[in-house]
Amino acid sequence: MEKRTYLKEVAALFLRIGATAFGGPAAYIAIMQRETVRNRRWLDEQQFLDFNGVTNLIPGPNATEMALWLGLVRAGWLGYAAAGLLFILPAMLATLALAWVYVAYGSLSQVGWVLYGVKPIVIAIIIQALWDLGRKAVKGWLTAMVGIAVITFYLLGFNEVALLFAGAGIVLLFQGGRQLLKASPSAMLVMPLLKVPLSMLSAGVIPFSQITLFLTMLKIGSVIYGSGYVLLAFFNSEFVIRLGWLTHQQLLDAIAVGQITPGPVASSATFIGYLMGGLPSALLATLAFLLPSFFFVALLSRILPWLRKSWWSAAFLDGVNVASLGLMLGVTWQLGRVGVVDWFIILLTIIALFLVFRSKVNSAWLILGGGLLGITYKLVLG
């Protein structure tokens, strides 16, 4: 009976997060932290930090991987499946609707303004999560300096994965001695993937097939790291240059859909699949893009407890954790520069910060409230 209750709890939470969460992976993870750690106490800050750090080291959309992990922690393997699928579902349905409009009318102009009031709420939620997680992740001067360095180099344009491994390596070096400063096996495996191009030289348009679509999305889902801008590069390499199935404008519209719909970045894959071959191809593309994440999280669930038992792997994980938070803070700064643009948004951000720190109000209500206020402001004052 208790397991069924937990499963229903997981299903309801991740369906709601998937339907209301905007702002990219940093925002989604912040909302998950608020709901599962701060509000519901499913796990503690250290457990959340550990898996957030590890998901940054594996390919795939981090927010989806965090949803899978949290579902597994709360309700076992059924919770794992329910959390992942229901987190994805709202974005997929919204994307299918937008893709139909796009195919029918040729564009998605004047849609992005609906997020005007949501951005400051998202920024406030991320700041609250960073405060909670940062107090656990920063364990002394060393981790504090690593976090500051990661933020600085991220804003200067350095690669996210390289910064994660560098942060982890520095903490490991200082805690364990110079004899441990050797190339990390995992880094040796991952870093070449960042250098290998996903496409060969373009040989003209290749005829569309669902098998090629599935294998291409599976390949991208198996090696993708970083933000939506990184995903743009991967999709461009495959679908515009190598296969010739999309134009640059269609690709930009696909990424835009990922930004204006709730839920994970997989919605861009859904959109591309729909453009290629309607509903069947949309479902196939989404499945292929997300399959690697389901596999990687299932594998990690077996080895993560072991990582905390060894001092050297625990030190490495501490470095990854603080570096991950540094990246989140860097993303928050970038979101703030783009999203906090006038007096109304500044005021809304201040109110949102007060609410997220002083109450346990549901994140969905905050986001919906911000959206309604933003729409009202645009309609009244333009």
Image (cartoon, rainbow, N blue to C red):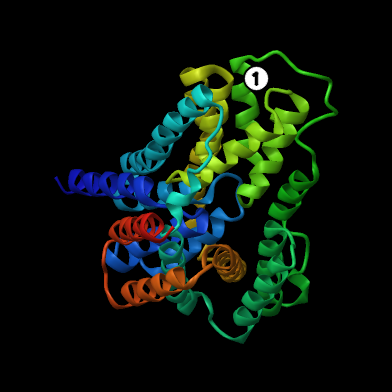
For residue 380, above or below residue 112: below
Circle 1: is it few (<14), some (14-19), or many (20+) Cα within 10 Å?
few
- Whether residue 129 is visible here, answered yes or no, is no
The quadrant where residue 125 appears: bottom left
The one nearer the camera, 365 or 211, is 365
- Whether residue 63 is visible here, answered yes or no, is yes
- At x 59%, y 23%, the residue is 214
What kind of element bears circle 1? helix
Q: Would you say 247 lies left or right of 83 here? A: right
* Residue 239 image offset from top left, x and y in percent: 69, 28
> Farthest residue toward the left?
1
* Residue 209 image offset from top left, x and y in percent: 63, 14
- At x 35%, y 39%, the residue is 86
* Residue 256 image offset from top left, x and y in percent: 56, 43
Q: Which residue is mark 1?
A: 212
* Residue 52 image offset from top left, x and y in percent: 50, 59
For residue 144, above or below residue 306: below
- The quarter of the rendered structure image containing the C terminus is bottom left
The quadrant where residue 307 appears: bottom right
